Image (tube, grey):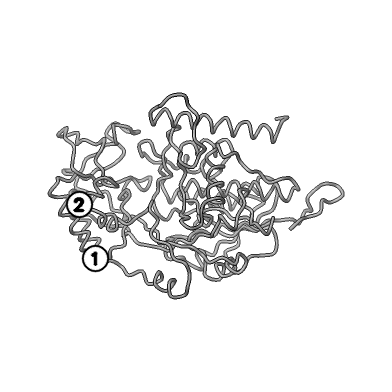
Amino acid sequence: MNYPIPPNGKIPPMTHITIIGGGLAGCEAAWQVAQNGLKVQLYEMRPTNPTGAHLSGDLAELVCSNSLGSNLPDRASGVLKNELRQLNSMLLECAEATALPAGAALAVDREAFARMVTEKIQSHPNIEIIREEMKEIPQTPVIIASGPLTSESLSRSIAKLSGEQHLFFFDAIAPIVHAESINMDIAFRASRYGKGNSDDGDYINCPFTKEEYYSFVEALQTAERIELRSFEEAIQSGVKAGAFFEGCLPVEIIAERGVDSLAYGPMRPVGLRDPRTGRGSYAVVQLRQDNLAGDLYNLVGFQTNLKFPEQKRILRIIPGLENAEFERYGQMHRNTFIASPKLLRPTLQHITRDDLFFAGQITGVEGYMGNIATGLLAGINAAQLLRHETPITLPNETMLGALCHYITHASLKDFQPMKANFGILPPLTLEKRIGKRERGQFYAERAANALNNHLNLLTPNS
């Protein structure tokens, strides 16, 4: 849709943008639009229509982990965070204000984070929150950021518009235990290679001997799992169904791939030694602080779809968790995303409608920071459109630009959600071979320069 420029060059006062979804992407998009002086109607169906994965009615609730990835400037996630700082991300500010000790990572008190975002959105004079389900795509300017648990009615509307079947896979969330039930006579505090914010380490580590590890793997491989009925229904209805997302596999699925798969994956013991003995372990389960009070810890990388009684039995096999009390068991949930390579432009606009934007996990980006980042870009570009200015396409040398390029140019045949990583950036042209860390520094410097140059071109007088 094209909007005529009014005679005075100003946007009509009644112009507003509808945003569907009050998650990370939707909230960041709403903030960016509102900060540009435009009115926002933010639709969030919770808590009236619960999703089965969310626990509260707060906006920007973190469903899976409470970690937003590495803060190190030479890591892909750190590069993306630096770009969002420069682009004035509100959600990143909230994350840093509610941060918890997590070594080199940015982890948050998930309840405090969601409350802070909710308060900021509610108090913004240009944002109206509507607690209703949006069942169809409106014919007015809109950003769809409905996330992986998009309602069935809205999913049908999206499918009708695009003519493409949905892709979806099953995602998993990790269990959370009460800190007081962890046996610290066995478990120990430490961060990998001694990196962390506290002297005794930011993580609680549960160490395995070789014999304990193999017994644990055998228990995982033979445990009862929850049937994925909706997965079977999707196949029967003719919807193309994807597999588990490789970056968020349940531990029992990893265990099926080989007896040592977990020891080289989420249970890898590298960089960790028990400070009481000075010895390493054959495998380790790490627990990360989940709230500011420090009385809840989540099992890092331990997504699972085992039946709840089985989780209680098998997770108590972990050394140090023999008497663990669980605040929440792991579970699976459907994760829906669109065929972005056929449907979206790098500006996050739909290919057939200039005023229709998509953002967040529904586009095929993975990870909290990717969701926030695409929400930010969609919000900026929606505001650009209503100001009759050209939407922004960020350089591929930036992490956000590379993510948007990937989801809009990838092969649809094997399209899977993508996190920020150096592999999606254009390759470096270097005269000599360098190490991984130095390569990360080069990527980071190039990304920062590319973003600075691009912003200077957009605002030459600033």
In the rendering, at what x and y percent does residue 313 appear?
20, 61
Relative to 165, is 251 above or below? above
Indicate the amino acid at tag 1.
Pro
**Residue 95: which disc?**
none
Assign the N terminus to one quadrant of the image.
Answer: bottom right
Tell whether label 1 touches label 2 (CB within 8 Å). Answer: no
Indicate the amino acid at tag 2.
Ile
Assign the C terminus to one quadrant of the image.
Answer: top right
In the rendering, at what x and y percent does residue 219 appear?
18, 59
- Viewer-proximal residue, 443 or 100? 443
Neighbour tally class for label 2: few under 14, some 14-19, many 20 plus, Cα within 10 Å: many
In the rendering, at what x and y percent does residue 136 appear?
62, 68
Residue at (55, 31) in percent of width and height: 448
Q: CA distance from mark 2 to mark 1?
A: 15 Å
Relative to 422, is 18 above or below? below
Neighbour tally class for label 1: few under 14, some 14-19, many 20 plus, Cα within 10 Å: few
**Residue 318: which disc?**
2
Q: Residue furthest top?
A: 431
